[in-house]
Amino acid sequence: MRRFPDPDPGNPDHRSPTSYLLWLAAYQRNALFAGALYGIVHVVAQALVPAAVGKAIDTGIIARDQRALLLWGGAVVVLGVVQATAGILRDRAALTTRLGASYRTAQHIARQAARLGAALPKRVAKGEIVNAGVVDIGRLGDALAETARGSGAIVAIAVVAAILLHTSWQLGLVVLLGVPLMVGVVSLLLRPLHRRQQRLREQQAELTGRAVDIVSGLRVLRGIGGEEVFADRYRADSQRVRAAGVAVARVEALLDGAKVLLPGLLTTVVVWLGAHYVATGRMGAGQLVAFYGYAVFLVDPLRRLTNAAGRLTQGHVAARRITAFLALRPEFAPSAVAPAPYQGPAPLTDPASGLTVAPGRFTAVACASPADAATLAARLGRYTDSAVTLGDTPLADLPPDEIRRRILVADNADRLFAGPLREELRGRGSDAGSGGRGRGVALVGRGRDAEVGGRANDAGRGRRGRDAEVGGWGSDAEPGRRGRDAEVGGRGSDAEPDGRGSNAGSGGRGCGVGLVGRGSDAALERAVDAACARDIVEALPDGLDDLVEESGRNFSGGQQQRLRLVRALMADPEVLILIEPTSAVDAHTEARIAHGVGELRAGRTTLVFTTSPVVLDRADHVVYVQGAKAVAQGSHGDLLTDVRYRSVVAREETE
């Protein structure tokens, strides 16, 4: 039995919907050919049954020839067995074709999403990807699978027409003229159906995207009282989709009616003419029975032919959307230049902003605007085109895989994925690299490179932008408190009612020091302590072996943030860039995290974008950015003399 998906899905031809369908057909040619062959054998055997029955009546029953009756009766049985066997084999081949086309397309959609990386949410709506990966791939598979029945239907019509022409050229001519006439009438309905299905498909994608945004940001919407506004918008969009669906249904209803009416009319004409020929003595009773059988039989292949046309129309609409997505290109082409030999940690420099991150140090950047932090992090991580250099090598000259191994950007838009917590924090599929070089893990920071959906800037209102990510899984900011997550439910809450902060762990175990043996259980335990996530683990029934639900929804916002920090620390890249890693915890926990991360990352390059005085005070070097430019730098204490820096960090009003 064939296994799916295939290890190598090939290189798709996405120049047009038709070329993509032909490419899929070429890859599935064995299954397609087998399905068509079995389909032809199936319908030919079925088409010959009326002829065998007619012969049995004329030469057996009417002529009272028992031998002829047994002979033609046996022929009917054999034809039935052949028909049943060929039908089973045809359906198996059709299923293989359907699954092959669907899985192959799904693989290409996933690979294209990963290849687009950070450009994906800018170029494609979330609903578009969801519909492509759920609805469109199924329609493509159905379109190709229908070729087995469609080809059999064409051959069946040809065989029946040949038999009728041989028996009576008038009846054969009626069939040969009637079938093309029916196909022409049906084709008149397919064109408006295609247009309306295309319009419906686009509106469904928009509605799905809006639904994803509403569900993921429901907590935020409740916090700002925007539920009714978005509900009204969704209701209006839903009605538009409903109207488009009704428009499609009107054409489909006409098409379904034509599938019954037109073959019925042809059957009626054939039977009437056959009966007339019997009455005039030009045809025997057995031949009339056979002709009636042919007329009834023609209904099925004609209906299959129109069904195949409808499925191919739907497949063409789906292929149009998929090829448009596969044709997208990343914002910048990867370098074809071979990377220079690794020479140890190097400074990371952004000439546009004047920011230089010294190797082996804990550097903090305080930005006057949260948008500047997102912009600088995207440039430093090569998520947008820039002139950033790592040592003397421009990032533009390094392959993307090399950059991802050496530089890791982690922010609050990253997601926790479903599965065992231990494996999620370790980073499944991690690559230890060689010589301590490039030890980032693609799994960490997946919210940038592979997330289907938008990434949100932690933009808060006039402040640090605490936990404002789209999805809002942890935006439980208490009024009047720096926007920290209060975390309810007692699963390691970061802020007790008395404000002391309950995340001290037991016995002040605090934050681990030194990540040695990355990927081991001991290293994971140290990373958990460094991110002060010990209370989260201990509150779980199975500890690190407990399961993470989809998007980490079984954890509050502050807990998710600390678990994401554990995952980033476990990656242990050469350069770790964190964006507001403590925005959803209380001040006491924040101090412990700053100390733990500093100790664990000692000797490694760490850059933190934050305006937290606690984290800034722990950094070896602090840079103040205003207007996307580094305007001051030094220690936290020295920069407090700068009124601009102090107004951002200490939350004082600028004089």
Image (cartoon, rainbow, N blue to C red):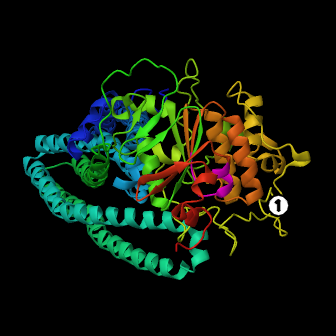
Residue 581 appears at what percent x and percent y? 62, 51
State whether residue 420 is above or below residue 501: above
Circle count: 1
Q: Up-down: is 446 above or below 631? A: above
Badge 1 crowding class, 10 Å Cα cut-off, few under 14, some 14 to 19, many 20 or more, is: few
Q: Is residue 614 rendered magenta in the image? A: yes
As helix, strand or loop, the secondary structure at mark 1 comes to loop
- Give the camera-side residue of 91 and 481: 481
Q: Is residue 247 left or right of 176 when viewed as pictured?
A: right
| Residue 366 point in image, percent of width and height | 54, 55
Q: Eyeballing the image, is 36 above or below 279?
A: above
Which residue is under mark 1?
490
Picture coordinates of residue 601 (x, y %)?
66, 35
Give the magenta-colored segment's residue range.
608-617
Query: Residue 79 falls in which quadrant of the image?
Result: top left
In which image quadrant can residue 262 be found? bottom left
Specify whether residue 154 is painted magenta. no
Q: Residue furthest right?
A: 507
Q: Residue at x 52, y 49 (%)?
A: 633
Residue at image coords 35%, 70%: 245
133 to the left or right of 282: right
Which residue is at the front of the view, 154 or 372? 372
The one of 429 and 337 positioned closer to us in this rendering: 337
Question: Residue drawn 48% across and 62% down?
Answer: 369
